[in-house]
Image (spheres, rainbow, N blue to C red):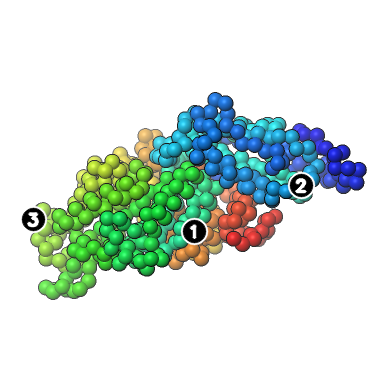
Amino acid sequence: MEAASFVTFGQYLRPNFYFLLLIFLQNGPPIVEGVWPLPQTFTSSIERYPLSPEAFYFEYGSQSAAQQGCSVLDGAFMRYFPLLFPDYTGNGVLRLYGDKPFHLVVTVDRDDCESYPHEDSSERYNLSVSARQASLNAETVWGALRGLETFSQLVYQDDFGSYFVNKTDIADFPRFQFRGILLDTSRHYLPVQTILQTLDAMAYSKFNVFHWHIVDDPSFPYQSRTYPDLSSKGAFHPMTHIYTQSDVRRVISHARLWGIRVLPEFDSPGHTKSWGKGQSDLLTPCYKGSSLSGTFGPVNPILPSTYQFMATLFKEVSLVFPDSHIHLGGDEVNFSCWSSNPDVRAFMKKMGFGVDFTKLEAFYMENIVNITSALNKTAIVWQDVFDYHERRSSLSVVEVWKGGCYLCEVRRVVKAGLRVILASPWYLDQPGPTHNWARFYTVWPLAFKGTEEQKKLVIGGEVCMWGEYVDATNLTPRLWPRASAAAERLWSDEKQTSSVDKAFPRFQDFRCKLVRRGIRAEPLYVGHCKHEYQGR
């Protein structure tokens, strides 16, 4: 432990020093409450080391594949310095401890600096904190980012504002590879700045996928280069409530620097009312008896022009969004309009579908999956598509979202040899007391009968924040800190994190960290944060 130094501050500081030393000896050195989500292995001691913002250095290890100029890590060092030292203003401050340098040395095995995180990216890291140095080793820059977040949570202040970190050794990796948050920007438009702040908060909880449910029935805010009428006629407002190509690039770039993938969703054939405003003949005309009713239903699955339009749109989307996966939706298709349309019924008869409209939906989805496969994109679909699909060989990843026995559905999907993303237990858009966080914590994604190989097909889960009752005014407190409960379930070892009571003090501490970082996370119960929310 560093020896206290007070002589340089002059004789007048000595009485204060002895008073502080007395408090220190009575109470002992404080230990930070912990890290959220909990690392796989974590040992720390009461031995602590002082940190000074004026003598703290990020460094690249001499053997690191990435060096200065690495956009991901250079940017992370800039972001994490004020998170480590939130009170530091750059002015000289008297301290009781000598300002001996402390080095955080980062070494990565691969130079991923200019790439994007992907589904197989390693996020494993090892962190060792000792006197005057911390060593962070990772296979990739994405793992280094997770380690930097962990280190930032280890740093704490005493009652007099001095910074410390305890002797610590951590070996860590995520339990599940896919840990996502869905934001719905169709039912309410979310400003870009709100999305960027959500990405920041996601990184603090080690989420790694932003599922952007960008369009839906109410509005089409994505501004397409190929089909500009989709947003000019389908958005709530053609100028103020859209995401330009520049906006989308900004979101993707910001996410990349946090090690977060951006997964776009263009949901069809249902949930497409806004599409029809800017693309004529795309939606199915509905009939009332033998006459057109003047209303429209899902995408018209019987016209060649439908698939020509979709191929062109998804070609653009595949170029704009670099991720290897794309979400195609496929949920909640209302068949009443299709069944009312004589042309659709004739097509059904010709194809041998009879009156089973699930076969028509399966036909449509198979065509869309083929389009995206030709663009080298792996399709993700909602569970409805799996339920209706007889030929499941074309499917790859199924997202389970319905209530009831959701693990029964998970079991059915993995028995078919398909990968699963679990969303059912993590719908956070409905208002509820924050103390129900335990409901989102006590979820056991693999608690179904199956082989080890089948359980490996559960690649993760995601929190869904649908937009019926959510916009920029209430998104953050409704999402945080409850989403962080799901984050720990998806990252940490299940046996070590099975107790709500044991997790609660650590969760309270983490919620206060979010608040201090400017995230309007709701309180978990009666109490206070040492640093309350100051507005932002």
Residue drawn 85% across and 42% down? 9
Nearer to us: label 1 or label 2: 2
Residue wearing tag 1? 194
Q: Is residue 84 left or right of residue 484?
A: right
Closer to the chain start, of discs 1 and 2, is 2
**Type of residue at label 2?**
Val
**Type of residue at label 3?**
Lys
Closer to the chain start, of discs 2 and 3, is 2
Residue 213 image position (x, y, % from top left): 37, 56
Q: Secondary structure at mark 1?
A: helix
Residue drawn 19% across and 56% down? 306
In the drawing, what numbered circle is on residue 350?
A: 3
Residue wearing tag 2? 93
Residue 230 appears anywhere in the view: yes
Residue 341 image position (x, y, % from top left): 15, 66
The N terminus lies in quadrant: top right
